[in-house]
Structure formats: C-alpha cells, structure tokens
Image (cartoon, helix red, strand yellow):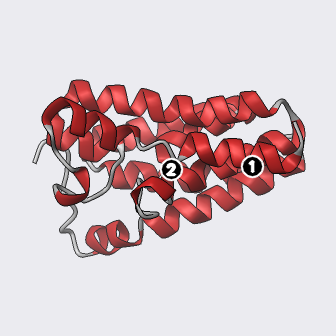
Amino acid sequence: MDLIPAIVTGYALGSLPIGYLVAQGASGVDLRRVGSGNVGATNVYRTGGPRMGVVVMIADVAKGAGAVLLAGGGPMAVAAGVAAVVGHIYPVWLGFKGGKGVATASGVFGVLAPWPTLIAAAAFGVTVARTRLVSLGSIVATVLLPVLEWATPGLRSVDVGATVVAALILFRHRGNVARLWSRTERALGT
C-alpha cells in the first residue's frame, strides 16, 4: 500500500464513530449532548453502562490495530496508525468532534510497539485503580508510551508517531488537566 492510500484508509477507519453509533443504536442517546460530550468509550461507559463501554473500547482499539495491519509495515503502517488516531479525534462524520484517541492509539501501538504499549497500559490500569480517574490514567499512559518507545530499539518512525499521537492526545485532554489541577475532575462511578 502506498503512503497516501495508507493515510486515507487509516483516517477512514479511525473516523468511524463507533461510540456514537452504539449509543444511538442501543438507547437513542447522542453522546455529544450528554456527559463529557465525547464519543469515546469513557463517555459511553458513563452514559450507557459498563457493557456498552467495553464494546466501544474494544472496537476503538480494533480500529487502530486494523489501520496498522492493513497498511503492512514500516513508515506506511505508522502513518496509517497516526491517521486513525486523527480520524477518531476529528471524525468527518461528526463535524470533526470525536473522542480523545486513547483506545485507538492503544490499538495502533499495540501492533507497532507491543512492549511499550503493554507497560503504558499497565500504568493506565494502576493509575485508574488507585484514583478512579480515567483521564489521569490516560495522561500517564500517553506520556509514558513515547518515552518507552524512544528508549527501545526499533524504527524511528514509530518513535516519531508515538510522540505525535501523544501530543494530540494531551492536547485533547487539556480540559481534563485543568479539572485535575482544580480537583474537580469526575471519577469513575460518580
């Protein structure tokens, strides 16, 4: 697959608004108008329950992994993966207002950089288990992944892709950072 088709395919897969479609189909809820207003797994979990949240999380991870696998290997796979995350965050179907990209990024880097992703996922899990703050877990994992990736031998394009995606995800979490700082961030189960 050439670079441009890889990017277009990655974006198209990433932009599928799975959370929005699941919430609409299951209960007629428009996620953009409830909870955090995001169409990602955490808002689905909060508004539709754990089962729907897990389904959306798995689908969002699969979007990222699928984009990478369809592109083959090397820099094209990285470009497709980054495009999938961009598609999830800025989906054309929802006026470029999507989720925060964490689950999709974990699918992308689960294929491209399995060990750093596994460690970052463990850090996410520990952080959420201790604090019940999904946003804090996401931020910790997002910062940790590119650090681990740069420290691990491998393709430089994966290191750069992890850094670009981390910057995008952290940008999307800027409101969460402000609420974490002011201690007004909503915890799971509240």
- Judge by depth and name the residue closer to the eye, 112 or 121: 112
Q: Give the vertical position of 147 relative to 26 (above or below).
A: below
Q: Which residue is mark 2?
A: 88
Q: Is residue 9 left or right of residue 172?
A: right
How many C-alpha atoms fall within 10 Å of the one at disc 1: few (<14), some, or many (≥20)?
many
Which residue is at 63% across, 31% downward? 65
Chain-order first, disc 1 or disc 2: 1
Task: Give the number of the disc on residue 72.
Answer: none
Residue 92 % position (x, y): 50, 58
Dot 2: few (<14), some (14–19), or many (≥20) neighbours within 10 Å?
A: many
The residue at which mark 1 appears reads as: 7
Q: Position of residue 93 (x, y in %)?
A: 45, 53
Measured in 3D between alpha carbons, the distance from the residue under mark 1 to the one under mark 2, in whole angstroms, is 13 Å
> Which amino acid lies under the numbered mark 2 shown in the image of this protein?
His
Q: Nearer the viewer, residue 64 or 165?
A: 64
Element marked by disc 1: helix
Asked whether 57 or 185 is in front, the reply is: 57
Dot 1 amino acid type: Ile
